[in-house]
Image: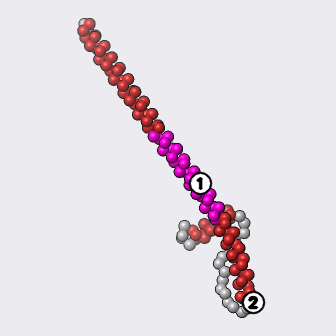
């Protein structure tokens, strides 16, 4: 092999090395950009989940208040129904009472009721 051929081969190898370095740098930059985009999506979705939990917490707090209101109104209505019965009236049946217990039990009971009536 003459020196001119060897020089050409060396130039080709050098150019391949330069091209490979450029490809590698481009790949690294694109990888970093994609990583940053994915981190942004990840952080956005974490915030969205936190927001969902906050809304669930708010609804459960509201639900707790509604349960308390229901129990108070039910108690007053049951007393009124008893008085109407004593007066000879037929006031009809009361709505179902809530199960005794905490929020968890009432929510579980209501979910079962809604599933049974195909509303959930």
Determine the image quadrant of residue 104. Answer: bottom right
Q: Kindly identify which numbered label has been placed on residue 34.
A: none
Q: Is residue 76 magenta?
A: no
Residue count near mark 1 (Cα–Cα under 10 Å), binned few <14, some 14–19, many ≥20: few
Q: Is residue 42 above or below residue 112?
A: above
Q: Kindly identify which numbered label has been placed on residue 86.
A: 2
The mark that comes first in sequence, 1 or 2, is: 1
Q: Secondary structure at mark 1?
A: helix
Label 1 belongs to which residue? 53
Q: Is residue 38 magenta?
A: yes
Q: Secondary structure at mark 2?
A: helix
The span picked out in magenta is 37-63
Q: Nearer the viewer, residue 103 or 105?
A: 103
The reply to whether residue 98 is visible in this rendering is: no
* Main SS of residues in magenta: helix
Of the 4 image quadrants, the one containing the C terminus is bottom right
Of the 4 image quadrants, the one containing the N terminus is top left
């Amino acid at each position: 092999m003459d020196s001119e051929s060897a020089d050409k081969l060396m130039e080709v190898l050098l150019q391949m090395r330069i091209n490979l370095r450029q490809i590698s740098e481009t790949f690294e930059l694109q990888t970093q950009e994609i990583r940053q985009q994915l981190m942004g999506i990840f952080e956005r979705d974490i915030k969205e989940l936190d927001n969902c939990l906050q809304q669930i917490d708010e609804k459960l707090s509201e639900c707790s208040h509604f349960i308390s209101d229901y129990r108070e109104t039910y108690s007053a209505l049951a007393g009124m129904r008893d008085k109407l019965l004593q007066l000879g009236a037929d006031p009809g049946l009361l709505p179902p009472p809530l199960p005794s217990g905490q929020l968890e039990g009432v929510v579980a009971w209501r979910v079962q009721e809604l599933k049974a009536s195909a509303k959930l």
